[in-house]
Structure formats: C-alpha cells, structure tokens
Amino acid sequence: MLVHIKKIIRDAEKRKYAVGAFNINNLEAMMAVLLAAKKQKSPVIIQTSEGALKYAGLEEIAAMVKAASYDMKIPVALHLDHGHDWETIKKCIKFGFSSIMIDASHLEYKENLKMTKKVVKYAHSKKVWVQAELGRLEGAEDWVKVGKGEGFFTDPDQAKEFVKLTGVDTFAPAIGNYHGVQKIIGKKPLRLDLKRLEKIDKLVKVPLVLHGASGFSDYQIKNAIKQGVRVINIDSDLRVSFTRAERKFFEENKNVFDPRKILAPGIQAMQKTVEKKMKMFGSRNKA
C-alpha cells in the first residue's frame, strides 16, 4: 500500500535499520522493486529522477506506482530524487509524492539555504517531507554531473546549521559516496568517510540518507547504517544488473522477438539485486 514516507523512515529509526530507495524509469524496474519487496516482506521507497519523469511521464509513473502497490501489504512510499526544477517539484507533490528532494548543492551555501527554505515552506504546507543535500558527490546521474576533483565532503558543523535553518526532514551528506556506474565496473575500491558520518549523525537531528551507494562493500554499508543512515539510494546497481542480463539474453536468443520474453531476464536480475540490498540493509521482514 502507498504510505507517507515518514511512516517508513520512522520505523527504520526506531528499529535501527535502513530502507532502500530504488530508482525506477519504467514498468519493468517498478515490477522488479515491488516483487523483491513483497518476497522479502520489506518496506520500500520507490524514487524517480527528473530525467525519468521526462522519459516516462510524471503522471504516468505516479499512477503506475499507486495502482501496483494498492493491494500490496507492504508499505511503499514515492519520492522525487534530485529535484531542482520548481514546477516539477510542485507537480510531484500534486500527484502524490510524499517526499521530494531539493538538490541545490551546486549553488553557493547561502543560495542553497534560500532555495531549500522555499521548497520546505511549500512542501510542509502540503504535508510533504523534504530532503536536501550539502556537499557534492563526484560522478554523473541524470542532470547531476560533478567531475573528478570537483566534489567536496560535507562539513559536520555546517550540516548542523543547514538542517536547523532549513527545517528539512531528511539530510543527504557527501562522505565519499559516488554517483554513476563507473564505480561498479572500475577496479579501485571505494570507501566512505565513516568518522565524518559519525560526527554528522551526532550533530544533525534528522534521518540521514546515503546517495550514490551502489558499488560499495557490504562492510561499508552496514557500518554506515550503524552510524545513523536510514535511507540508502540505489540506482546504478539496478542499471548494471538489467543491462548485463539483457546482453546475455540477446547473445543466447537471437531469434526471440517477444518483448515480454526479452525483458523478463532483466526484471529477474534487478529483483535479485534489490532483494540482496534489502537483506543487507536489515529491512527484510520489517513490513
């Protein structure tokens, strides 16, 4: 059933686990995420970027998620990931998103504050939660593109001030997390600054969100959860799972033309990835 994101996150806070926020772009990705959540009896956040909304349609994605989750006994929330267009944010709120992210991290600190406050004021008037980010993650995802050496980590003291002044409901720090698929197919191991995360968790009194979490080791993720992370975003892992499964299918089935048969391996591969994440995050059997 579709619920407000606060119900999901507050339970995660109470029982000290993390909920996966999985990006979808189409029916197949949504099916994979919901099938995994149903099998693992896990609460789940379905999120979509502005690029995905442009590709599939905002009203269409919202209606699809509402219809698919209607008879499900697990809690499902709908969230806008990396929103920066004011009109899109308002439209998402209108069509049932219970949480939106305003990503003004590319702006100077004072401008980030100003924009975030504006969004919080409007969203809270509609009983919608707001997530914001301070610091910049390297890599590319949707409209967000930060080159190597251009990212910077979140300052814990500044994070405390930012959250207090803006009134956001969840906060996404930059602690070495990374956007994009290159981190998954690359050879260099990635590491999170867990000490920085610990300081942020002590100073910031709202649930923390880990962006760019695909490709990190189980050890890193589990320790991030111990340090206060309650929502973990996953996108690149799903894309890689789907694409690899589809490439293998086409190599072995050159004469199959039924889209349902063609797309099935990709759905199954994404579902397995989501289930693995849910087990790692500790959300299994928490629905």
Image: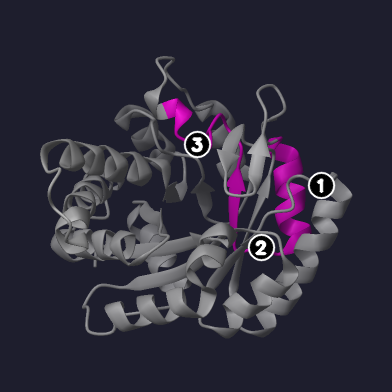
Tell me the element at label 3: loop
> What type is the residue that disc 2 sits on?
Val
Query: Which residue is label 1 attached to?
Result: 107
Left or right: 31 with respect to 225?
left
Residue at 43%, 48% (x, y): give it.
232
Tell me the kind of residue under disc 1.
Leu
Q: State the image coordinates of residue 184 (x, y, percent, origin top left).
A: 39, 28
Q: For mark 3, what is the residue?
A: 180
User: In terms of secondary structure, where does tag 2 sit?
Assistant: loop
Q: Looking at the rendered structure, which numbered label has been put on residue 168?
A: 2
Placement of the N terminus among the 4 image quadrants: bottom left
The Cα–Cα distance between marks 3 and 1, rounded to whole angstroms, is 21 Å
Circle 3 Cα neighbour tier, 10 Å, few/some/many (<14 / 14–19 / ≥20): many
**Residue under the image location 43 percent in, 66 percent down:** 10
Name the spot of residue 151 as percent of width and height, x first. Answer: 69, 30
Contact between labelled residues 1 and 3, with CB atoms less than 8 Å apart = no
Instruction: Tell me the quarter of the picture where residue 44 sits.
Output: bottom left
Residue plotted at (71% across, 70% down): 120
Is 145 placed above or below 90 here?
A: above
Q: Secondary structure at mark 1?
A: loop
Which comes sooner in the sequence, label 2 or label 3?
2
Q: Which residues are magenta?
A: 155-183
Q: Which of the two residues, 174 or 187, is positioned nearer the viewer here?
A: 187
Task: Residue type at mark 3: give it.
Answer: Gly
Q: Quadrant of the C terminus?
A: bottom left
Give above or below for 61 relative to 126. above
Q: Quadrant of residue 81?
A: bottom right
Give the Cα separation between the discs numbered 1 and 2: 17 Å
Residue 127 shows in this picture: no
